Image (cartoon, rainbow, N blue to C red):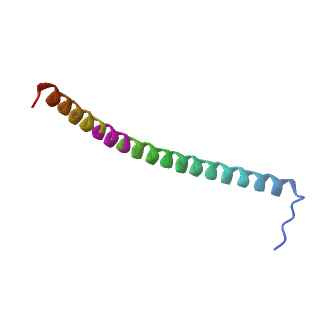
Amino acid sequence: MFVDHSDPATQARLLDQAKAEAIHLRREAVDDFWRGADAVWQHSLRSGQALAERSAARLKSSLARHARSRSGV
């Protein structure tokens, strides 16, 4: 099918369609980006919490060992 692109009305219509499609694609891309960023952020929160809990447990154990060795038990 041949489309006459020299017609100003056709050019304007095609430009409007292209702009509308660009806006739609941009919105989808931004949504995808923030969904991915949120997933990474949530994962880092869970990983960070687990790391903090392990560190606290190790510190508690170390302090308990140190207290036992100082009391001579």
In the picture shown, does residue 59 fall above or below 24? above
Residue 13 colored in magenta in the image: no
Q: Which of 63 and 5 is in front in this view?
A: 63
Q: Which residue is drawn at 11% across and 28% down?
A: 72
Q: Is residue 70 left or right of residue 33?
A: left
Report the front residue among 38 and 13. 38
Residue 7 vertical position relative to residue 30 in the rendered view, above or below: below
Above or below for 2 versus 21: below
Question: Which quarter of the rendered picture does the C terminus lie within?
Answer: top left
The picture places residue 27, in percent across and down from the top left corner, at 58, 48
* Nearer to the camera, 51 or 43: 51
Residue at horizontal 77%, vertical 52%?
Answer: 15
The span picked out in magenta is 47-54
- The x and y percentages for residue 14 are 77, 56
Q: Is the magenta stretch mostly helix, strand or loop?
A: helix
Q: Quadrant of residue 11?
A: bottom right
